[in-house]
Amino acid sequence: MNFIQDLYEMTSKNIGYDIAYDVFKIVLGFVIAKVGYELIYMKRWWGGWKIKVQDGTTNLVTRNISPAVAKRVMSDGSDFSVFVKGVASTFFWVNHSDMSLEQANKTGLLQVDSDNKLIIIDKAHNPASPQKTNITNEQVMEKLLELEAKLNTEK
């Protein structure tokens, strides 16, 4: 009976240290896994991507793409289309309905160079608008301001 009581006292005194040590091991394992994932996997495979908007040979902008965004965009076709159109929309209206990876090199509007981790959007290869409208962004903004002024005067 004395042996069991001594064993109980030894384990009860060290149980706090044992739990703290186990929690420390779990946290350390998580930190090592997270750092390994971010630094080794994400940066090595998805880091270094750039997107470039140009008009013929004139470079309009070159932007870096973060590894998380590059992974999301390159692995999902719908995200790719939205991302590319979002970057291009700052400079011109994209008249192409589907900017998928499969159709990237067909029109010349979009080029994806996986070896150099580069996406190129070329305004010079933007197809003609199917609606043949001559409405500019300035005209749209002018009309919106007119509507806003009309709404403000009605209040």
Image (cartoon, rainbow, N blue to C red):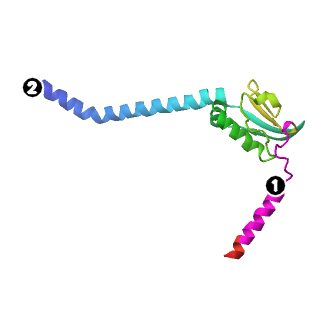
Rendering coords of residue 49 (x, y %): 72, 32
Q: Residue at x 74, y 67 (%)?
A: 147
Q: Quadrant of the C terminus?
A: bottom right
- From which residue to which does the magenta span run? 125-150
Q: Circle 1 sits on which residue? A: 137
Near mark 1 (Cα within 10 A), the count class, few <14, some 14-19 or many ≥20, is few
Q: Quadrant of residue 43?
A: top right
Rendering coords of residue 152 (x, y %): 70, 73
Quote the CA–CA distance across marks 2 and 1. Answer: 90 Å
Q: In the figure, is residue 5 to the left or right of 10?
A: left
Label disc, if present, on residue 5 of the rendered structure: none
Q: In the figure, is residue 152 to the left or right of 59?
A: left
Label disc, if present, on residue 1 of the rendered structure: 2
Rendering coords of residue 15 (x, y %): 27, 33
Q: Looking at the picture, does residue 1 appear above or below residue 155?
A: above
Rendering coords of residue 16 (x, y %): 30, 36
In front: 38, or 147? 147
Which residue appears farthest toward the right when viewing the image?
Answer: 57
Helix, strand or loop under label 1? helix
Q: In the figure, is residue 152 to the left or right of 111?
A: left
Q: In the figure, is residue 146 to the left or right of 30?
A: right
Near mark 2 (Cα within 10 A), the count class, few <14, some 14-19 or many ≥20, is few
Q: Residue at x 83, y 31 (%)?
A: 108
Q: Quadrant of the N terminus?
A: top left
Q: Residue at x 23, y 30 (%)?
A: 11
